[in-house]
Image (cartoon, grey):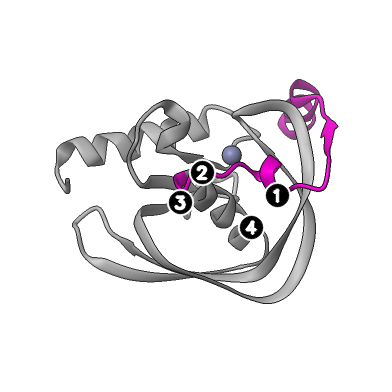
Amino acid sequence: MFDESLTHLVEDLIETMKSDIICIGLAAPQVGISLQVAVVCPDRDFSNVKVLINPTNITESGKKDIKRESCMSLPDLGGNVERRKRLSVDVRTLAGETATLQFEGFEARAVAHELDHLSGTMYSDKADALVTLDFDAIRSKLAG
Ligand SMILES: [Zn+2]
């Protein structure tokens, strides 16, 4: 698995994420690829993209927090989801090595959302209710 095709998949996911201003994470199953691979980057300068390959030992801790999430796979919808503020996960790097990554706050939420995709769960399965959003209006606002 740890070969050039995996590197290309990760690069494609990052490019797709970067191509949409409201996209802060993307999982391979969202683009029709059944692999345990996702990318996350809440910072819009993309200086610190996190690559999650074959995640295991997902541990959520800290205080519970409820915030609105939305998803590229469910356009123009959002919903409040309860998650914990810290997340630890073991992943493989592109070189096939094992690494433990720790996240907090918004980044932990974004990672948890993408890890859910890898197990076939959508945020909408966890949200109390869904509201209608205008993704294009949000894009315009973010683009300034
Ligand atoms: Zn999503």
Label 3: element kind: loop
Task: Indicate which disc residue 117 carries.
Answer: 2
Q: Circle 1 is placed at which residue position?
A: 126
- Give the Cα separation between the discs numbered 4 and 3: 15 Å
The residue tagged 4 is 109
The answer to which image quadrant residue 57 occupies is bottom left
What residue would you read off at disc 3? 49
Mark 4 lies within 8 Å of ligand 1 (Cβ measured): no
On the rendered structure, is 134 left or right of 112? right
Going from N to C along the chain, the mark reached first, 2 or 4, is: 4
Which residue type carries mark 2?
His
Looking at the picture, does residue 77 appear above or below residue 117? Answer: above
Image quadrant for the N terminus? top left
Mark whose residue sits in front, 4 or 3: 4
Sequence-earlier tag: 2 or 3: 3
Mark 2 CB in 8 Å range of ligand 1?
Answer: yes
- Going by the picture, which residue comes out furthest to the bottom? 62
Q: Are marks 2 and 3 in contact (CB under 8 Å)?
A: no
Check disc 3 and give the amino acid type: Val
Tell me the kind of residue under disc 4.
Arg
**Which of the marked residues, 4 or 1, is nearer the chain's N terminus?**
4
- Location of the C terminus by quadrant is top right
